[in-house]
Amino acid sequence: MTSAHFSEVAGIDASAQPPAQRPAPRDTTGRPVEQLAAVQDRLASWLSDLTTLHELTERLARTDSLDTTLHELLQAGAALVGAQRGVAVLEPADGQGPNTTVGLGLERSDIGTLETVPREAAVYGRALDAEIPASSRQTPATEGASGETPPDLLHPDIAADLSLPPRHREVASQLGIGASYALRLTAETTGTLGAVVWMYDEPAEPTERQRHLAGLYCSFAAELLAKHLRLARAQRDVRTLREGLLPARLPRVPGVCLGMRHRSGTAGGGHWYDALALPEGALGLSVGAVTGTGPGAAAVMGRLRASLRAYAVMEGEDPVAVLSDLELLLQLTEPARSATALFAYAEPAQHRLVLAGAGHCPPLLVGERRVEFVETSLSAPLGMLSCWEAPSVEMSLEPGETLVLYTDGLLHRGGGTLDQSFARLHTAAARAPRETREDPDLLCEHLLSACLPDDADAAESTEDIVLLAARFE
């Protein structure tokens, strides 16, 4: 039987062509639907990553200090890489500080234990200060802001990694750390700032995508840390300048005991205090405040305080003459500024006090029988009039009474009206316990705490506060 006859018997049309293979579904551009779905999934993933980074960086941008930025960096980074704990170390490569360490999910003692790990071990963030050997460096997932690849270091199973120093593995076991992932913090303008390391309770490692997001986030955080670092250094330098322009210690004068408190504000710089031992057992006391803030005000304050000491030596028995000379100096050297000041000339042996004020807060007299403000008469601040002059006030002090001089920062930072601030100060002095009134230092601390219960040590407060107390025996 021929093949044609066999096809005919079988009912097969030998002339018919075999059916063509059915093409895969395609979109309007001619691409397979599966490929398009993969692209859409990738775009959705990128969009999700961008949204996450946007939210986290917005939160980070709202931080206002080095510590808050480091804490936010730790928390957000831990969420990105799926870690439970972490530690961030700020240790700028230029050695100028400030250096600080903050932890996430760690006690202070835990951080202290981590500090015993060798720096090259990299379970602790500061290990990244040194260059990481190429053999132990993981392939970075992203590029930093400067265009260089930021080093990262991953130990997915610390206990099983025999290349790590024994102390490293011992501390990890003690703290329950199964794995760690670290990134160096590097800014384009300041270089290496420190490092951050996240820790896992069990052996683990972040995915490539997690490391990519963490790298981008740390690049942004490093630049923000650099800005906070510059601000912190500027504030530290201004504070150091102000402190250097004030007395390093108070003098010892027979018959009188001195105490003080000084709180530097972030925008302050012009408040001063001084106590000067004068001839024949006398004592000169002064407080004052220059208008303006910052290094310029601090520089003017230093010149005025130094000049007032010289005037006090020459004619301290006449406080009005001392302030008149100071006013003339201010007009000649700083015509655009004004200042308030108060100077008191005390003779402890005679319990005699002569004082004068120029637009300054009235001093407070605190004793067993009386608590009252000493009215120094209404007078204009120095530099406000063409010729300043005001009468002096002379008074006798009883043994055990304390004269408290202060600047207006004590009143302004307490909130409320000026009358309320004066009333609060008077009430605090009147209610001070006996043992507190007998110690000028304790009295200053008591008044400061009573007038500023929530602000006495606030680092963000803008104004200076000065309290100078002299107790006459």
Image (spheres, helix red, strand yellow):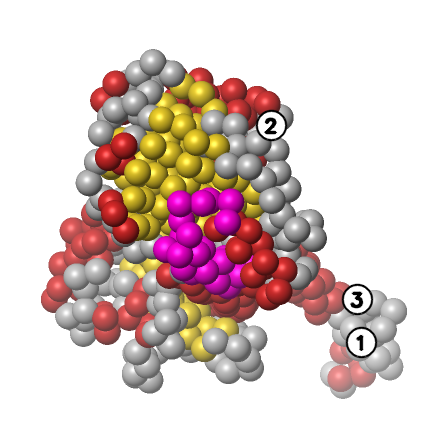
Q: Which residues are magenta?
A: 297-321
- The residue where tag 3 is placed is 25
Mark 2–mark 3 Cα distance, whole angstroms, equals: 81 Å
> Closer to the camera: disc 3 or disc 1?
3
Q: Is residue 376 left or right of residue 284?
A: right
Looking at the picture, how far across and down is residue 444, in whole percent? Answer: 35, 33
Percent from the top left, x then y, of residue 188? 53, 77
> Does residue 77 appear anywhere in the picture?
no
Q: Which residue is mark 1?
A: 20
Examine the rendered structure and indicate whether residue 195 appears above or below residue 104. Answer: below
- At a point 15% along the width and 70% down the height, the residue shown is 165
- Is residue 201 left or right of 340 when viewed as pictured? left
Dot 2 or dot 3: first in sequence order is 3
Magenta segment main secondary structure: helix
Q: Residue at x 83, y 67 (%)?
A: 27
State the quadrant of the C terminus. Answer: top left
Q: Amino acid at mark 1?
A: Ala
Q: Residues within 10 Å of mark 1 (few under 14, many from 20)?
A: few
Please name the residue that numbered disc 2 is placed on: 418
Q: Secondary structure at mark 2?
A: helix
Crowd rating for badge 2 (residues with CA inside 10 Å; few <14, some 14–19, many 20+): few
Q: Say which element carries label 1.
A: loop
Task: Specify whether residue 428 is in view.
Answer: yes
| Amino acid residing under circle 3 | Pro
